């Protein structure tokens, strides 16, 4: 849901050819339509993601066709599949290597909660090791659901204050995960 509020243009910058807005909104709009995802796909949900990138569903329509397999050139971490506890530190390392601002989607039941694998070896949700912005339910979620998750991220990105990453609340959130 957009939080863009319309207001009267200030005197002197009204009429055709002028749009009054704020820097937050312009940057949010640009960021939300050029998200570079990093697919961290470990099992079956990753196959659904491949379909999401294919011609039928075509995530490129949302400006996200440029996948990054380097954390330093990505701003959306998409975790798809079962994450073993041994892999938790690796996932966390990938997250730490991403520059701010960064967002995270847990795609499918396994990434969100461990799914059907309530066992000694499986991480019961990636939010045990890194903060998550959007959870996509399903085992596996269909490509439409993955696209819906990306669109929820776009809403967050579009409406995020440029100051959020420096806020006390955000620092406390990261501190809760032991991240400086
Ligand atoms: S949620 Fe289901 S489809 Fe996705 S990785 Fe787990 S078992 Fe596979």
Image: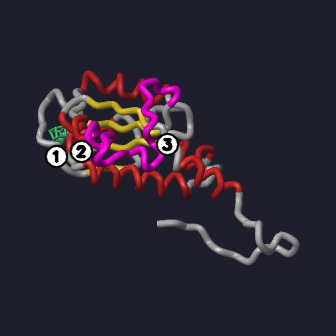
First in sequence: mark 1 vs mark 3 = 3
Q: Quadrant of residue 8?
A: bottom right
Residue identifier under label 2: 108
Check mark 2 vs ligand 1: CB closer than 8 Å? yes or no. Answer: yes
Asked if one can make out residue 73 in the rendered structure from this viewpoint, the answer is: yes
Name above or below for residue 110 compared with residue 156.
Answer: above
Location of residue 88 in the rendering, given as x and y in whole percent from the top left corner: 31, 27
> Quick check: 115 left or right of 56?
left
Is 162 in front, or is 49?
Answer: 49
First in sequence: mark 3 vs mark 2 = 3
Which residue is painted at 43% across and 33% down in the image?
Answer: 67
Q: Give, as a single range, the part of the protein colored magenta.
A: 49-73
Is 91 in front, or is 4?
Answer: 4
Q: Nearer the viewer, mark 1 or mark 3?
A: 3
Which residue is painted at 28% across and 47% down in the image?
Answer: 56
Residue identifier under label 3: 35
> Quick check: 10 left or right of 92?
right
Q: Which mark is residue 139?
A: 1
């Amino acid at each position: 849901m957009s939080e863009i509020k319309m207001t009267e243009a200030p005197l002197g910058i009204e009429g055709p050819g002028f749009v009054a807005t704020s820097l937050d909104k312009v940057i949010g709009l640009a960021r939300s339509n050029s998200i570079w995802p990093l697919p961290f796909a470990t099992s079956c949900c990753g196959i659904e993601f491949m379909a999401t990138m294919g011609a039928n569903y075509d995530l490129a329509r949302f400006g996200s066709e440029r996948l990054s397999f380097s954390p330093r050139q990505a701003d959306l971490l998409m975790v798809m599949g079962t994450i073993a506890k041994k892999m938790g530190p690796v996932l966390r390392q990938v997250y730490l290597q991403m520059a701010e601002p960064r967002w995270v989607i847990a795609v499918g039941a396994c990434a969100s909660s461990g799914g059907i694998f309530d066992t000694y070896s499986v991480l019961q949700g990636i939010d045990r090791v890194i903060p998550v912005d959007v959870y996509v339910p399903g085992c596996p979620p269909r490509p439409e659901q993955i696209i819906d998750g990306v669109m929820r991220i776009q809403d967050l990105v579009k409406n995020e204050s440029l100051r959020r990453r420096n806020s006390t609340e955000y620092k406390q959130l990261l501190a809760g995960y032991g991240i400086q």
